[in-house]
Image (cartoon, helix red, strand yellow):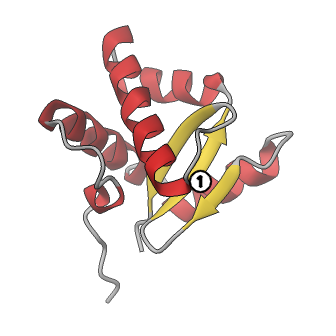
């Protein structure tokens, strides 16, 4: 049996409770995509986008730099307000920078591994 880590383990530098709640909601939404694991989603992004968005990976997460349309799709999927989307993107940007050591070229997206 595969042990699945808490998706918030990939976000140790996001400490605000409201941010953590929103990040957890986003990570749950990613894990609920039908017929796709997190690794499958990353693979799809890597093969379908003009530029490979994967910047780095570690034992807990994939760190991607994505165009804004990816976040627009998540906002639609999750029914986020503009303020919630801005808050979620800022939390991902903070964690990306803390983990990778630099900011993303486009929009930061941190996806916690699900296996």
The residue that appears at 36% across and 59% down in the rendered structure is: 10
Left or right of 46? Residue 66 is left
Report the residue marked by disc 1.
Answer: 41
**How far across and down, in percent of the image, does residue 15 sit?**
20, 43
Q: In this view, does 75 lie above or below 94?
A: above
Q: Is residue 36 visible?
A: no
Q: Which residue lies furthest to the top in this view?
A: 82
**How far across and down, in percent of the image, does residue 108 sit?**
55, 38
Q: Is residue 2 visible?
A: yes
Q: Residues within 10 Å of mark 1 (few under 14, many from 20)?
A: some
The residue that appears at 23% across and 33% down in the rendered structure is: 19
Instruction: Decide which of 108, 33 is in the foreground and name it.
Output: 108
Q: In this view, does 31 lie above or below 4?
A: above
The residue that appears at 40% across and 18% down in the rendered structure is: 86
What kind of element bears circle 1? helix
Q: In the rendered view of the protein, which quadrant contains the C terminus?
A: bottom left
Instruction: Decide which of 60, 25 is in the foreground and name it.
Output: 60
Q: Which residue lies furthest to the left in this view?
A: 17
The residue that appears at 35% across and 47% down in the rendered structure is: 27
Q: Residue furthest front?
A: 101
């Amino acid at each position: 049996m595969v042990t699945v880590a808490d998706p918030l383990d990939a976000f140790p530098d996001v400490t605000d409770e409201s941010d953590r709640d929103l990040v957890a909601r986003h990570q749950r939404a990613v894990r609920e995509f039908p017929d796709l694991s997190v690794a499958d989603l990353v693979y799809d992004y890597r093969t379908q986008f003009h530029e490979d968005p994967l910047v780095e990976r570690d034992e807990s997460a994939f760190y991607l730099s994505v165009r804004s349309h990816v976040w627009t799709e998540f906002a639609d999927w999750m029914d986020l307000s503009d303020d919630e989307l801005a808050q979620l993107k800022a939390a991902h940007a903070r964690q990306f920078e803390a983990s990778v050591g630099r900011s993303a070229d486009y929009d930061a997206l941190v996806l916690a591994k699900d296996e």
